[in-house]
Image: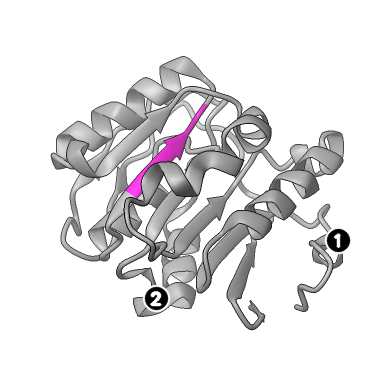
Amino acid sequence: MAKRTKQKLQTRSAKTEGNAPSNREPELQIIGGTFRGRKLRYHGDPITRPMKHRVREAIFNLVGTDVEGKYAIDLFAGTGALGLEALSRGAVRATFIERHIPTAKIVRENIASLAVEEQTTVLETSAFLWGKRDLPHFQSAIHNSQFAIPWLVFISPPYAFYVDRLDEMLELIEGLRKHAPPESIFVIESDERFDFGQLPHGVKL
């Protein structure tokens, strides 16, 4: 966990060993909060890598009650499990960003199954494009008062992005850090290929 005066950056690193694809469709469910035990859909497409329950549980143990009152941003959303888990635990709204159209459809189906359409937005776009084009205007678009709601940002991309698209990943994280309101929290998942020492200047781990 890294702390700064105006923001907190929490990180979680997960290794890929033992995560070989299976022909059996995994069963996903909300593991805490109002929707605890509610099942989530997953189409089984290997392009989506659902986070294991124990990793998601560890992340929310780190965040703790700080999730309450936050605006969740679920980048590389996949099934939407992280953003929906945040809503279950007290986040006030959530935006899901997923460029793979069939996967974004699953996110919408999971949102509908929990009846949280009024609290959510799904954007079918690249997280990198969103970061360059829309992020600078995002805060003013979602807040109607002078008091900005702190963000809870989940960054859980395909691990290969930390190698193949490292510069873009760092640019995205820096842009989020720059625009996030005070008391925002970032949760970053990676495997061992990412050196957390490369995070934006001023962040200490």
Would residue 56 be visible to someone looking at this image?
Answer: yes
Image height of 186 relative to 62, above or below? above
Q: Which mark is residue 77?
A: none
In front: 61, or 42?
Answer: 61
Does residue 95 show up magenta in the picture? Answer: yes
Q: Which mark is residue 198?
A: 1
* First of labels 2, 1 by sequence position: 2
The single residue placed furthest to the top in the displayed view is: 101
The quarter of the picture where residue 42 lies is: top left
Q: Is residue 128 left or right of residue 43?
A: right
| Percent x, y of residue 115 | 13, 39
Task: Kindly identify the residue that appears in the image at 37 percent across and 69 percent down.
Answer: 67
- Magenta part of the chain: 94-98
Q: Is residue 34 left or right of residue 169?
A: left
Badge 1 amino acid? Gln
- At mark 1, the secondary structure is helix
Does residue 131 show up magenta in the picture? Answer: no
- Quadrant of the image containing the N terminus: bottom right
Image height of 91 relative to 27, above or below? below
Image height of 44 relative to 199, above or below? above
Q: Which mark is residue 66?
A: 2
For the residue carrying disc 2, how many other residues have a C-alpha within 10 Å: few (<14), some (14-19), or many (20+)? some
Number of residue marks: 2
Chief secondary structure of the magenta portion: strand
